[in-house]
Structures are given as structure tokens and as C-alpha cells.
Amino acid sequence: MTDSAVQRVQRKPRADGERSRRTILGAAAKLATIEGLEGLSIGRLAAHIGMSKSGLYAHFGSKEELQLATIETASEIFSADVVAPAEQAPTPLAKIEALCEQFLSHVERRVFPGGCFFASAAAEFDTHPGAVKERIADFQRDWTDLLVQLVREAQAAGELRDEDPHQLAFELNGYLLMANTAFLLHSNAQAITRARNAVAARLALSQTTT
Amino acid sequence: MTDSAVQRVQRKPRADGERSRRTILGAAAKLATIEGLEGLSIGRLAAHIGMSKSGLYAHFGSKEELQLATIETASEIFSADVVAPAEQAPTPLAKIEALCEQFLSHVERRVFPGGCFFASAAAEFDTHPGAVKERIADFQRDWTDLLVQLVREAQAAGELRDEDPHQLAFELNGYLLMANTAFLLHSNAQAITRARNAVAARLALSQTTT
């Protein structure tokens, strides 16, 4: 065998393992938005993806490890689907608009069947202290920090007027969360439209001089 | 025995049953905001309140019946704690302000340990079609309708300017929901303050003439 063939052979099991792990966790993240992260037992997930429980145990030693790995995968999916496209926008204000729009589109396209993974996970784990809740809270903090940072940059660039960036981020976040909740509960896209209107009006208000 | 003594004796078991049912459902509603409505098995609830499973089965024939009765009780608690005090306010606008304030105070006082019962229940059941989800969606619709109706009355009274009442109600609701989520996740009362600021600023905006 040539060296590169040896490398291919040696690499293959790892690549397969990595692919399989990603497939498992993608399915786990989707399932979690329906059944909850607590409903994500190794047994139920094994049945859902047609894999043996022992095969899953080889990947994840415990339910908490599976939950944390699922959150990481959900975070990567969210980054690729919501954050990365918004980063292409030309100015801080355009990035804020794009982030809000990408979030609403992410919910509307049902990237996760139960809407925003982190809204769902937060509602489930807010009363369960521990590593899982901390990881969800970290994600929410990072998301809010990103919005706040962009508001500061937009203010520095003269695109938005001076006001408390945390307050503005809170209000934008409220429209997005409300859209997610109402869209899922009433299966009605009106909530998405109302959130779009609210974001546009709130940002327009912050563009006027007082 | 006199007639009234007979009545007392006859009534006693029913009054006891009613009291006991209310005690059970109050505990169930609180537990549901921590463990979820799906976590509300008759066995777990029996252990939680120190009652026999057979005793609970005498009250509720099935888990769904228990869930629906728990939702009714949560709805009564919410009405008494949030809606009734706001009804005392003198004008439609004052009623809207009082409803928002009562909601935020309801979350802050942890009337339910897991915050707003219906936010929690909606996040859990939004992907589970059936009678329980329908009852939760009905509650949310009633709450939104109440806000929309008060906005209409405030507009008719000249307290708020003409704008889409559904849009305004959506935005106010977003602030309240965001406060509930952030308060529970970060154990930080700042979210409550930000929601208060947001409600006040949004209503002030709707009081200005365009």
C-alpha cells in the first residue's frame, strides 16, 4: 500500500465515525425540539434513527453527554443558518436587520420542526440547574451580546441614535421570541409578519434623531 | 338530626372532595412549570403531594384529564392574580398598563416556580397536537384578544392613536414573554425592568399623534 492509501484506510473509520456522529446529533437536535431534551433518552433516540442502543452508547456515555453534544450541534446549525448569512451584510445596521430576518426565516422554514431550538430548550431547562441549563444560558448570552455589539457599532457609525443597546436588543429579541411562540402554537405565519413589522418600526425609530 | 345538620353531613364529603381537588390541582400546576405537563404523571404527582395513586385516580381518570384540569386551575390562578386586579384600573389605557405590570409582577413573585404557566406549557405542547395544546392555544388567544380589545377601547377613548391593535398587542406580548424567559434563564430581575421600560416607551409612542 502507498502511504496515502494507508492514510485513507486509517482515516476512513474516523471519518465514518465523525459522519455518523454528526448524523446522530442532527437527528437528536430535531427530535429534541419535539420531545424535549429530557425526552432525548439514548433508547428513544436509538429507536428514532434505527440504531442499536449499544451503538449509541459507544458515541455518548450518558444522557447528559448526549444532551450537551446535541446542544453543540444545534448551535452549529443555528450559526450556519442564521449568523453566517447575516455577517455578509455591509453595515452594522444591515447586519442587525439580516440577523432578525434570518432568525424569522429559520423559524418559518422549520429548520427544526419545533421552531427555535434554544427557545424550546430554554423553556424546558430554565428550572433545572446544571450543565445543560448553563450551556443554553451561555448560548442566549452570546446571541444577545452579538446584537448588543452590533447596536454599539451601528451607533458608532451614526446609523442608530444613542440609546441603551441592551434595551434595544431586548425589544428586538422579544419580537423574535414572540413570533416563534405564536407561529408554533397557532400554525399561522401572521406572527412572523408582525415580528418583521415590529423589527422594522423599532429600528426606524432608533434611526430618527430625538 | 335537623335538616341543616343533615345537609352539613351530606355536604361535607363533597366540600372535602372539592377542597382536596383544588389542593391537588394547585400543586399540579406548580409542579408542571418545573417538570412540564408531560412530567405530570399521576404517579409522580401522588408522590409529590403524598397521596396514594388510587386516591388520585378517583379524582382524575387519565393523565390527559389531569393535564386539562391542571390547565383550568392555572387559568383561574392567572385570572385572579393578573387579570382581576387590572380590571380595577379606571380607563382602557390604565387597564393595559396594569395588565402588563401584573404579568411582570406575577413572574417576579414566582406565583408559579417556573414563571408563566402558559408560556411554559405552550413551549412544551406547541409540537403536540391534541386537546391539551388546543386548550393552551385558546388561553393564549383569549389573553391576546383581551389586550386587543383594550387597545381598541383606548383608541376609541382617544387615549391611544389609531394603529393596528393586533400589532401593538403583539409587541407588548413580546416584551412580557422575553422578560419571563430571560428572568428564568439568568435569574436576573434586569429583564423585568427592561420589559417595564419597553411597555412604557411603546405605549408612550402610541399616545403621540403622528
Image (cartoon, coloured by chain):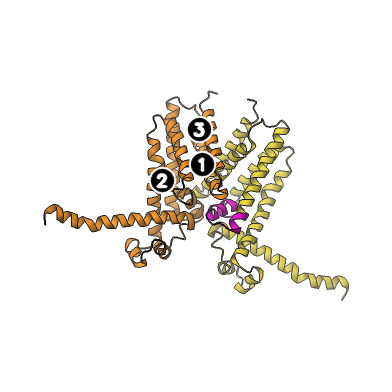
Chain colours: A orange, B yellow
Which disc is residue A78 wearing?
2
- What chain does mark 3 sit on? A
Q: Are marks 3 and 2 in contact (CB under 8 Å)?
A: no
- Residue under circle 1? A176
Circle 1 — which element? Answer: helix
Q: Is residue B129 visible?
A: yes
Mark 3, residue position:
A164
Residue type at the position of mark 1: Leu
Please report whichever mark, 1 or 2, sits nearer to the chain's N-terminal start.
2
- Mark 2 surroundings within 10 Å by alpha-carbon count, few (fewer than 14), some (14 through 19), many (20 or more): many
Query: Residue B13 appears at what percent x and percent y?
Result: 75, 71
Is the N terminus of chain A in the top left, top right, bottom left or bottom right quadrant? bottom left
Query: Residues under labels 1 and 2: Cα distance?
Result: 14 Å
Q: Say which label, 3 or 2, has the lower sequence index.
A: 2
Quadrant of the snapshot with the C terminus of chain A: top right
Secondary structure under badge 2? helix
Q: Same subunit under labels 1 and 2?
A: yes
Residues rendered magenta in the picture: B112-134
Q: Residue furthest left?
A: A2
Question: Along the line of sight, which residue is nearer the eye, A199 or B4?
Answer: A199
Q: Give yes or no for residue B120 being in the magenta stretch.
A: yes
- The local secondary structure at tag 3 comes to loop
Q: How far from the left and from the top, in percent, is residue A202?
A: 54, 32
Label 2 chain ID: A
Tell which circle, 1 or 3, labels the residue nearer the N-terminal end. Answer: 3
